[in-house]
Image (cartoon, rainbow, N blue to C red):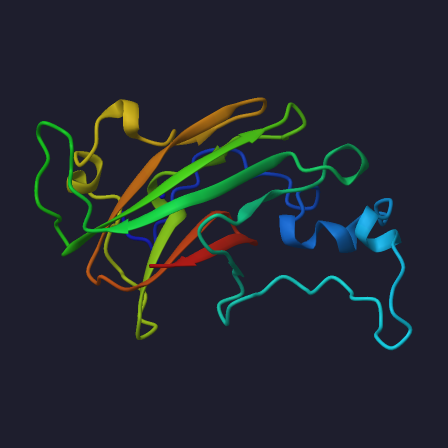
């Protein structure tokens, strides 16, 4: 989801970050959508109309997400999303189902179940493997090792694994298993500089 701090894999052409908007920020960079039923309904004269809160950002500059919350990219026609994903579950120390599974190299496996889809307007591939994942311990220390270890890869069968590369017009589901030294912390997914999300585990 190599050395994370210094050797992040960047093997494909970079996405056009200027075109891709963080899903949580899409409203501020495109024309305001038509009001929803709730927005158009009457409001009490004693309380102001609520406004959309800015997306929560960590001290590291990543958008903070929780299990079940959508993350992805905007920039499509009329401000529509071109990629929407959701982490449906996070499990620490899951049981490995693969035949040749081994113990974690760094201490703990963390399994993120992910599903989502992209539209034909996605301008390039999204990468979920290699150096796109970073583990940060509960005390804020960034793990300098490789969470994409051989042990993590061998923990699950190919059919269960989330695709390493997701292109335009795809619907995908599976799991990313990472190998980290602590049972609690934060997992960061950063497919390109300036595009990053994080989840607590």
Residue 81 in view, yes or no: yes
Is residue 84 or residue 18 the one in the foreground? 84
Please report the residue visible at 13 percent of the width from the left and 48 percent of the height from the top: 104
Is 70 left, or right, of 44 in this rendering? left
Please report the residue visible at 85 percent of the width from the left and 50 percent of the height from the top: 32
Q: Position of residue 178 (x, y in %)?
A: 26, 47
Is residue 84 or residue 20 the one in the foreground? 84
Please report the residue visible at 17 percent of the width from the left and 39 percent of the height from the top: 150
Above or below, 149 relative to 138: above
Above or below, 35 relative to 165: below
Q: Quadrant of the C terminus?
A: bottom left
Is 5 left, or right, of 49 in this rendering? left
Q: Quadrant of the N terminus?
A: top left
Is residue 163 or residue 54 the one in the foreground? 54
Above or below, 91 relative to 135: above
Q: Position of residue 60 (x, y in %)?
A: 48, 67
Please report the residue visible at 26 percent of the width from the left and 49 percent of the height from the top: 147
Q: How many marks?
A: 0
Q: Position of residue 149 (x, y in %)?
A: 20, 43
Q: Quadrant location of residue 73?
A: top right
Is 47 left, or right, of 83 in this rendering? right
Q: Position of residue 164 (x, y in %)?
A: 38, 31
């Amino acid at each position: 989801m190599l050395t994370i701090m210094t050797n992040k894999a960047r093997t494909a052409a970079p996405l056009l970050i200027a075109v891709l908007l963080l899903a949580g920020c899409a409203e501020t960079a495109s024309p305001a959508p038509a009001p929803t039923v709730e927005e158009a309904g009457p409001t009490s004269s004693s309380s102001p109309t609520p406004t959309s809160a800015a997306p929560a950002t960590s001290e590291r500059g990543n958008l903070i997400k929780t299990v079940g919350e959508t993350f992805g990219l905007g920039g499509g026609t009329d401000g529509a999303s071109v990629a929407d994903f959701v982490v449906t579950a996070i499990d620490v120390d899951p049981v490995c189902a693969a035949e040749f599974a081994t113990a974690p190299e760094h201490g703990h496996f963390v399994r993120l179940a992910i599903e989502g889809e992209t539209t034909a307007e996605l301008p390039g591939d999204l990468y979920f493997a290699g150096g796109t994942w970073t583990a940060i311990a509960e005390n804020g220390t960034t793990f300098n090792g490789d969470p994409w270890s051989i042990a993590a890869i061998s923990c699950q069968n190919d059919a269960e694994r989330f695709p390493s590369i997701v292109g335009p017009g795809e619907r995908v589901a599976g799991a990313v298993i990472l190998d980290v030294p602590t049972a609690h912390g934060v997992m960061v997914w950063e497919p390109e500089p300036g595009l990053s999300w994080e989840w607590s585990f």
